[in-house]
Image: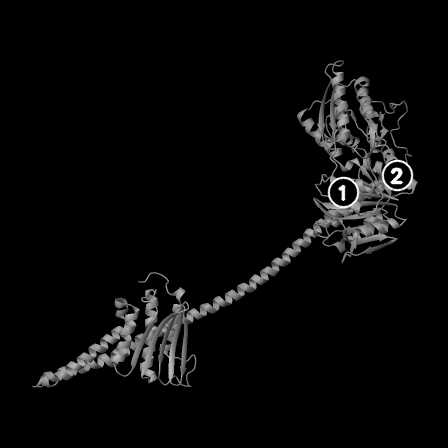
Amino acid sequence: MRIALFLNNLDGEYQLSVYRGVREEARKLGIGLLSVQGEALNGKSASGAGTIPTWKLIATDGILLLSSVFTDESEIAIPSELKAMASQVPFVSIGMRLFDYHSIIVKNRESMELLMEHLIMTHGYRDFIYVGGPAKHQDNVVREDVFRKAIKDGERAFPGLRGRVYSGIFNELSGMEIMRNHIALHPERPDCIVAGSDNIAIGIQELLQSLSDPRWRNCPVTGFDDISQARLVNPPLTTVRQPLSEQGRMAVRAIRDLIRGIAVPGIIYVESTLILRSSCGCPERPEDASGGTERILPDMSMSAAPYDIIKSEIYSLNVNSLGHNLALIDSLPVMIPYLQSFLTNLHVRSFYFILYGDALENTGETGYLVFERSGGRDLSFAENPPAMDTGFFFRKLKAKEEFQDLCLFHLRSGNEYLGFVLYEAPDQVYPQMSGGAVFIANTVKRLRLLDDEKERSRRLEQEVAYRTKDLLEVNRKLKEEGERRIAVEAEVLRISDLERRRFSADLHDDICQRLAGISMFCKSLAAQDAPGVFLPELSELIDETLIRTRRYAHDSFPMDLDAFGLREAVAGLCDSISREGALRCSLSWDAPDPLPLNRNQEINIYRIIQEALQNVLKHSGAELVRVKLSAEDSFLLLQVRDNGKGMGKGHRRGREGLGLRSMEYRAHQLGAEYRLRSRKGSTAVEITMPLALMFAGPKN
């Protein structure tokens, strides 16, 4: 038979005392025990962590629940996880009444009433402060109610009797903070401070002892619970003794009977006892409320007490050393030697360190074993932790008789369950094991964040490499484009210079020669008696010169283009070629008229046709040339085809003349595709331009 005890952490006297009672009775009855620490069964833990349903995995026959799992409610709304748990296996609550479920609770009202009566009647105190736990906590509700009632009922008999109430948490820090704030606002000292737990009272005592005002240092303080520290502090605490270990023992007997099918009362009450010590102002060794004498020191020899204190200090130093060392590591494998040293120094016999995957939507059913200490040997799997079924893992442990008392500590970070550690350790090191487990959890979270950061850095470096490669490629293309543009600009300047040189040569070799001839004729006429003989020749020469001058002017800029449009200008160009008689030129226009072209586009198309026709006149030896302009499938098609001799086998790409390069350049300016096709008996210049590019601004 195995049972599980769910509690917060084994790092405080209240929980340790209950745990010891549970463990002792379980051993006595031969029942295996697994203590589960840090699982928020109601989904409302102080850390805000969610729940991992460990009870489904641990192969247990019954469950005990310590009330510390619930932190702040008087009437618990039973969460679905708890209901599911109680519906599967027998279930007993310790320290808090859960309605409809078996509960072990302490009667503390009468003892609290005796405490208040003692303070008011015996000591004559009239000014009180009550510092309690959570306002809705069942135990605090009872203690605070007794305090208020005692003040109210005593006001009639003792004028001036008053009390102030503060709510906090059942720990030392809460008591310190509440009293520190109170003293800052109310420097006058009360007669007595009544604390809702020994932990709160010890925290208040420590704060008061640190003050310089002797009135506050001597202020009476009382507690509740009677944990072992209550007897060791100075002065020892007057308190109410809750039989914590007895609650644990009674809970084990109840769960055993429930597992066996034996009827158990729904509520089992345990009596409490008022314990009077010197913190309330009583003598050093007063009698307790039942008439017996209370020892100030625990039941141990004077020589044993310092030894245990020294051992406790050494264990605490081991925890601090572990925390310091783990703060410096950067990987799980580096953690293992420090963990081994920590476990050895605390005489931990068995230890399992198991992590969950990074993405924790998980139910805890799959884990990864990082480290194992069992059977006198240590095994580390930190380099590559193997996956395992945690349910199967717990079933195997249940079958091992040597593991009767195991503690499970959930490793958590905020809302995330990281994994758990499972261990078997000596009684006196449970608080240190809890502290060490917290350091382990924080380290695991830090290492995961570090791994995430490394992965982000790796991806960022990879992305930078990709971007750098892309930038280098873009830079290369920009460089090529820049070089190409420089080459084009140089070519444009060269072409422009050649055009000027050609125009100058035409004027010099043709017009100037003709004008020189006319001048010579005129001089000859002036020297002769019969000038009329030369007048017809002179008139013809002047007419030809005028025609050629107009042609050069037209070639330099086609005035017809502005006056009549592209179609008429091209038609006029074809007519002038035909009129010269050496070549017939025809025009075929199968496109919209006018075309949606801007002025620059019209000029470039006209110049391409003009240059193509000039090349035909000069080089082809053709008798016929056809100019065709048509619109097909969203493209404007231009073709100038002759029936000449072709360009011959000696023609090679890259060795074209000025005219051909000029046509190609103008085609690129249009965003068009330029092709030159030549074979024996025919040459064709073809331009293909998308219609979407035909209008790019106002036509001017």
In the image, residue 612 above or below residue 564? below
In the image, residue 90 above or below residue 533? above
Q: Residues within 10 Å of mark 1 (few under 14, many from 20)?
A: many
Q: Quadrant of residue 564?
A: bottom left
Q: How is the image coloured?
A: one colour
Compared across the picture, whether 490 is left or right of 440 comes to left
Q: Which mark is residue 309?
A: none
Q: Which residue is mark 1?
A: 39
Nearest to the eye among marks 1 and 2: give it: 2
The residue drawn where x is 89% and y is 28% is: 295
The residue drawn where x is 29% and y is 81% is: 584
In the image, residue 687 above or below residue 335? below
| Mark found first going from the N terminus, 1 or 2 | 1
Position of the N terminus by quadrant: top right
Residue, far left: 529
User: Which amino acid lies under the numbered mark 1 shown in the image of this protein?
Assistant: Glu
Residue 409, how many percent across, how many down?
A: 79, 45
- Would residue 316 be visible to someone looking at this image? no
Q: Which residue is mark 2?
A: 261
User: Which amino acid lies under the numbered mark 2 shown in the image of this protein?
Assistant: Gly
- Would residue 2 be visible to someone looking at this image? yes
